[in-house]
Structures are given as structure tokens and as C-alpha cells.
Image (tube, helix red, strand yellow):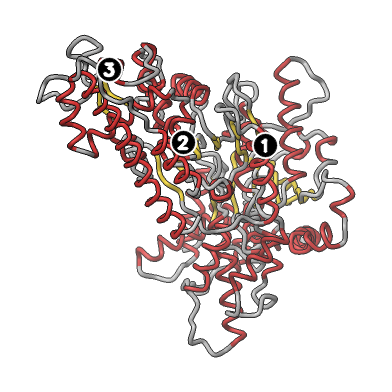
């Protein structure tokens, strides 16, 4: 409905309401005259012609007058409608208020009473006075109980008065809990199909006040909101978001909010988006209050909640809001890029292959990428490179998993030049990198994904003693592929309570899925072990936990790495399910010399370091790096270049830390 239609309707609605009030005033004047004329010689009052005029006016309106919609929605009788019009009339017409006071025999009694309505209007019935009547249940009128019920003044609810006058706004009591959502963005075609399904289902139940509750699953709130806004616009409704924490736990307040929202939703066709995404499952009181609210609230409710489904008698429609398809994401990226640069040069294919983003995030990321690009850059090659790098970086940030204390993000700084490994191990690492880069072509373009979902994830086991380069190798891969790296300590994830370990693992994988970050599961020995002999229920359940981890690793769209210090402790049946297994050997003297040669940054001053002598220290690369760093601090404190004496001091400290005997003669110098 456009602005012109709304303005026309407003004018007609005002005219209709004024006509109804005028008609009611004439009824009351006729009643007053009858009271004054004891002999009843007055001609009978006949409003037929004026009623027909008002009916013709209503027929020409784009939608029914507000008073008629209210009467229909709440099933008011003609008598109840007249009571409501009388209460509205004294607010709109001072002359009617004076007439009411005159008829009630008290010049100060401008507000009507039930007694007046019972006496003056046709079809009067006592049930209109009951607390369960539509007038009082829906709080359409307020009763000032200072006298007998029939003498108590009655007043129209202020918001209902505004509604009758054609003013459509949210009740001020709801303003504190509800937020209007206005979205100009059209959902993607695949999401519109889901929206149309919801609309069709709701339309079939349109005669029911308690429509099915539509629960929207999926981890992207922006897409859900966009979908909900689209549904609201198609239903010509306004969408309001209410947090689950805004629903009162107190029973009375809960019921009042439910009643008030229901009243406003039924009158104005509002859609409620109940956000339960942050709801804690152990908050029993709040969950109970939410179920009560949902059970009793009328109108369309869209429930956002992945971790909780209300146990209610009311029908539910549980649907998953998936992100746009890869093709839709690519199309949207191209639209965002526009004529700023060539889509192929922007590397959009690689971006869509790696990152699974909502439409809202793509728009935000695109705006951010191009707002940070130097528009005056004339070199197209440099400009394209800057866009590619910035786009990848921004997408990484937008998909960065929120996993609380379950994982530690590592900023990858190591490169291929930093890692010292036998050539065979290095080749396997490069093969892993290759598969990550080409997975979209092989799985999607070449059709391997159609052969089954199991085993499409890239999984690896890095085995070796502490300090032999397992974490550094993960950093090298993350650095080369420009991906986030998260280290998960499995000893912290494993929980003694049944089912909690899987919940922790699920949270990690679900959070990381959209960006395909590299997941490094450290200390796999905490969960893995030889389970061929199941001795108790704990052993049996550990098998379940391991199977769940491997299942999620195999389905994960990025790289998932397990590390262990004891490869022999792992069951071979588990090892067969991993695509890559790399053994990180303890470095020999030649490799240790190479590590010492590379360990110091180029800007670090060094003096006469004997690499051959240093290589005799039988320690892994991790310890070498610790010694080099500590030696640099000793040298900096003396304002000297790093010398063998500094390394000696640092080595002695490192050996003491790892509880290993230190042979002073190995590298001792003057």
C-alpha cells in the first residue's frame, strides 16, 4: 500500500469514526429526550439512512475502518461496540461529554458508566461488564472501581483511541522490549523459497489465532532477520524483535505482556521475532516463562533458537535457514564489486570456495574492502593484489570462530624457510597445502563430492616429541594459505560428564565451519588410545567421543590436525581414517645446525657462533628457539652481540627447565 492509499484511508477512517460517534450521540440525545418526555409522545428514532451512508463509505475504503476491524478481531457485540464508541466519543467530542454528564445527572460526571450504556443502548447485556469480556480482557477500556460497578466511570485505553483514529504505532508499554526491524535487502532466491513455504503454511492457518510457532534454525542471525523481514513485508506486517531476556519471569507480568502483544499483533498484524539465541539451557525459570509466553501469545511468532526448542502443545514448524548457495554468494559478490574491478581479478572464485558467508556479511565485507583501497592507485596489478589480500583478510575476520576458552588463536608467522624437516616430511606438508588450495576444483568442479560426503575433509596427524615442529608446521600452512589457525587443547575439551565432550567439539567445528580455519587439536593422547580392550563404560564412551571427533574432522571443510607425542599409543583403526600422517623426528646434528643457522632474525647481531658445537646440544627445535630468544635478552642487557657465552647461560637454564642433565663441556667457552 503506497502513501496515497494510506492518506486516502486515513481521511475515510476519520470520516467513518466521526459518523459513528455522531450517530451514537444522536442515540443518546434520543434517550435523553425520552427521559425528559414522560408521556413518550416523541416520534421513534430511525438511524437507518445514516447507517446506510456509513456502510457505503466503508465499502469504498481500501481496507475496513479501524473500529470495524477491532470489532471483528475481538468479536465485540453491537452493544460492546457502542460502549467503546461512547468512551471514544467523549474524548473526541466535548459536546458528547457534556451530554453524558447531563443524562447521568451530574455536571462533573463526563465519563460514561456501564449503567448509562445498559439503559441507553439496544442489545444491552450484563456479560459486557465481566472481567472475561472482550472489552475488559483485552484492556480496551479501563474501569475506575470507586463505586458500584454500574456507576463506575469507564474510559477507553489511550492506545486503542489512537488506533481507532488511524494512528498505527507500537504501544508505549512495548517500546521497552520490542525493536522495529526495517530491512531493505531482499533475501537470496533459495531463502525466498523457504520464506514462501512459511507464508503458505501460515496462510492455511490464517483462521487460527494460535498460529504455528516457526522456529528458525541456523547460526547466522543476519540471514534469519532478513528472512523474517521479508516474510513481514509479504504479509504487509511490521516485524519486531524481542529478546528472550525481555520476557518477564514473574507470572503476572508475563501474562500481561502476552495479552498486550497479542492485542497489538491481532489489530496491526505485527510479526514477533523472539530471539532466544543467547538463552542458557540451565536457566530453568526463564525457559518456563518463555514457554508460557509462547503458548499463550497470539499472532505469528518466529523463534530464533538453535540450542533450545520449546516443549509446548502449540504446533511448531522447525526450519533451517541455510546461507545463500555458493552460486548466490558469487553473484552477490559480483554485484558488490560492481565496476570497481574485474570479478575474476578480484579472486571471487577462491573467496567463495573458502568462505561461507551470509548475504549481510558479504555486503558489509565488500563495503569494508573497497573503502580501504587507494582509489588513486594507477597500477592495476598492485590494486588487484591489494584488493585480493584485503578481501581475504576481511573474510577471515568475519568468519573468525567464537569458541570462548576452548581454543587459542595463533597468529602464524613461520614460513617454509623457518622449518627444518627431512625432505619427505616437507613434501607431505606441501601436499596438504596443495589439497587445501585445490579442494573446490576436485570436489565440486570435478564431482568428487557427489561420491559421498565422508572423507571430504582434509585430516592429518602430526606425531613427534615436544618441540620437533608440529605447531610450527601448522603455522607454515596457515601462513601460506592466509588462514586463521586455532589450537585446541584436547585435554581441556574432554569432559568427564557423558555427552559434554561432543558438545564442546561440536561448538568448535560449527563455529569454524564458515571460514575453514585450520584447527590444531593438541594433546590427542587425552582422547585417543588403544581401545581394543573395552574394560568399562568409560572406555566404551571414549570410543564414541573419538568416533565423533573423527567424523567431524572428515566432514570439516577445512584442515583439521591432530598432534601426539606418542603415535604408538593410537589405535591403527583410528589412523586409517586420517588422510595424512607425518612423523616429526627428533632432529639429528645436521638438522640441529640448520635450525641454529635459521633461528636468529636477520637484524639480530651475532658474534662468532660455532654452529657445529651448538649442533651437539641434543635438543629439539622448540628448545633451540627458547635458548636463542633467552640468549638474545642476555646480549641485549649487556649491549653486545649474541655470543656463545650468552647461549651457554640460556642453554643451562633451558636444560634445567626440561629436567635434562647439561654437559658443560659441550659448548662451554670463555
Relative vertical location of residue 664 with respect to residue 481 in this rendering, above or below: above
- Identified at 51% across, 58% down, the residue is 184
Foreground pick, 668 / 467: 467
Circle 1 residue: 201
For marks 3 and 1 on the same chain, the one whose residue lies earlier in the sequence: 3
Q: Give left or right: position of 129 versus 608.
A: left
Image quarter for residue 141?
top left
Cβ atoms under marks 1 and 2 closer than 8 Å: no
For marks 1 and 2 on the same chain, the one whose residue lies earlier in the sequence: 2
User: Which of the numbered marks, if any, corresponds to residue 155?
Assistant: none
Foreground pick, 39 / 275: 39
Image quarter for residue 134?
top left
Circle 2 residue: 69
- Closer to the observer: label 1 or label 2? 2
Provide residue 279's location: percent of width, then percent of height: 49, 31
Provide residue 89's location: percent of width, then percent of height: 27, 34
Residue 468 is at least partly visible in this image: no
For this orientation, the residue located farthest to the left is: 107
For marks 2 and 3 on the same chain, the one whose residue lies earlier in the sequence: 2
Circle 3 residue: 114
Image quarter for residue 80?
top left
- Closer to the observer: label 3 or label 1? 3
Foreground pick, 555 / 587: 555
Relative vertical location of residue 604 with respect to residue 117 in this rendering, above or below: below
Amino acid at each position: 500500500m503506497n502513501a496515497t492509499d494510506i492518506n486516502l484511508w486515513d481521511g475515510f477512517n476519520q470520516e467513518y469514526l466521526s459518523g459513528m460517534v455522531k450517530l451514537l450521540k444522536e442515540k443518546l440525545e434520543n434517550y435523553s429526550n425520552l427521559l425528559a418526555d414522560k408521556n413518550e409522545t416523541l416520534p421513534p428514532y430511525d438511524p437507518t439512512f445514516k447507517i446506510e451512508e456509513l456502510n457505503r463509505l466503508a465499502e469504498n475504503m481500501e481496507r475496513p475502518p479501524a473500529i470495524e476491524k477491532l470489532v471483528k478481531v475481538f468479536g465485540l457485540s453491537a452493544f460492546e461496540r457502542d460502549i467503546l464508541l461512547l468512551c471514544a466519543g467523549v474524548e473526541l467530542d466535548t459536546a458528547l461529554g457534556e451530554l453524558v454528564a447531563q443524562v447521568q445527572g451530574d455536571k462533573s460526571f463526563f465519563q460514561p458508566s456501564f449503567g448509562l450504556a445498559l439503559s441507553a443502548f439496544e442489545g444491552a447485556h450484563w456479560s459486557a461488564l465481566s472481567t472475561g469480556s472482550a472489552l475488559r480482557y483485552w484492556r480496551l477500556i479501563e474501569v475506575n472501581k470507586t463505586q458500584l460497578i454500574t456507576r463506575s466511570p469507564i474510559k477507553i485505553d489511550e492506545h486503542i483511541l489512537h488506533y481507532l483514529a488511524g494512528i498505527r504505532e507500537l504501544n508505549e508499554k512495548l517500546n521497552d522490549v520490542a525493536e522495529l526491524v526495517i530491512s531493505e535487502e531482499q533475501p537470496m532466491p533459495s531463502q525466498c523459497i523457504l520464506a514462501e513455504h512459511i507464508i503458505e503454511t501460515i496462510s492455511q492457518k490464517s483462521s487460527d489465532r494460535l498460529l504455528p510457532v516457526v522456529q528458525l534454525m541456523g547460526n547466522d542471525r543476519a540471514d534469519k532477520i532478513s528472512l523474517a523481514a521479508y516474510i513481514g513485508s509479504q504479509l504487509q506486517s511490521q516485524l519486531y524483535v524481542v529478546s528472550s531476556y525481555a520476557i518477564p519471569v514473574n507470572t503476572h507480568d508475563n501474562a500481561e505482556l502476552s495479552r498486550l502483544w497479542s492485542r497489538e499483533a491481532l489489530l496491526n498484524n505485527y510479526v514477533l521475532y523472539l530471539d532466544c539465541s543467547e538463552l542458557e539451557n540451565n536457566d530453568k525459570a526463564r525457559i518456563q516463562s518463555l514457554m508460557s509466553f509462547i503458548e499463550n501469545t497470539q499472532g505469528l511468532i518466529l523463534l530464533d533458537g538453535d540450542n533450545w526448542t520449546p516443549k509446548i502443545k502449540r504446533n511448531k514448524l522447525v526450519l533451517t535457514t541455510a546461507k545463500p548457495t555458493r552460486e548466490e554468494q558469487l553473484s552477490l559478490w559480483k554485484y558488490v564489486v560492481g565496476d570497481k574491478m574485474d570479478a575474476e581479478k578480484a579472486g571471487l572464485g577462491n573467496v567463495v570456495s573458502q568462505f561461507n558467508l551470509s548475504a549481510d556479511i558479504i555486503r558489509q565485507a565488500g563495503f569494508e574492502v573497497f573503502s580501504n583501497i587507494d582509489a588513486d592507485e594507477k597500477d592495476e596489478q598492485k590494486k588487484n593484489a591489494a584488493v585480493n589480500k584485503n578481501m581475504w583478510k576481511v573474510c577471515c575476520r568475519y568468519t573468525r570462530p567464537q569458541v570462548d576458552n576452548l581454543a587459542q588463536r595463533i597468529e602464524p608467522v613461520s614460513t617454509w624457510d623457518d622449518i627444518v624437516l627431512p625432505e619427505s616430511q616437507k613434501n607431505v606438508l606441501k601436499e596438504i597445502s596443495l589439497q587445501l588450495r585445490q579442494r573446490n576444483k576436485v570436489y565440486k568442479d570435478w564431482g568428487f563430492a557427489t561420491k559421498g560426503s565422508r572423507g571430504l575433509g582434509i585430516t592429518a596427524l602430526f606425531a613427534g616429541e615436544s618441540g620437533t615442529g608440529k605447531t610450527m608446521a601448522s603455522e607454515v600452512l596457515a601462513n601460506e594459505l592466509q588462514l586463521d589457525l586455532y589450537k585446541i587443547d584436547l585435554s581441556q575439551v574432554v569432559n568427564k560428564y557423558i555427552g559434554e565432550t561432543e558438545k564442546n567439539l561440536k561448538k568448535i567445528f560449527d563455529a569454524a565451519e564458515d571460514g575453514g580455519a585450520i584447527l590444531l587439536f593438541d594433546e590427542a593422547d587425552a582422547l585417543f588410545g588403544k581401545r581394543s580392550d573395552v574394560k568399562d563404560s568409560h572406555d566404551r564412551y571414549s570410543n564414541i567421543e573419538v568416533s565423533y571427533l573423527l567424523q567431524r574432522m572428515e566432514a570439516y571443510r577445512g584442515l583439521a590436525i591432530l598432534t601426539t607425542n606418542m603415535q604408538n599409543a593410537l589405535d591403527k583403526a583410528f589412523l586409517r581414517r586420517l588422510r595424512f600422517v607425518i612423523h616429526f623426528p627428533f632432529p639429528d646434528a645436521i638438522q640441529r645446525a640448520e635450525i641454529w643457522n635459521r633461528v636468529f632474525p636477520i637484524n639480530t647481531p651475532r658474534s662468532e657462533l660455532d654452529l657445529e658445537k651448538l649442533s651437539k646440544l641434543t635438543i629439539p627445535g622448540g628448545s633451540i628457539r627458547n635458548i636463542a630468544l633467552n640468549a638474545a635478552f642476555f646480549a641485549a642487557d649487556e649491549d653486545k652481540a649474541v655470543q656463545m657465552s650468552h647461549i651457554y647461560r640460556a642453554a643451562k637454564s633451558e636444560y634445567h627447565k626440561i629436567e635434562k642433565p647439561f654437559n658443560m663441556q659441550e659448548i662451554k667457552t670463555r
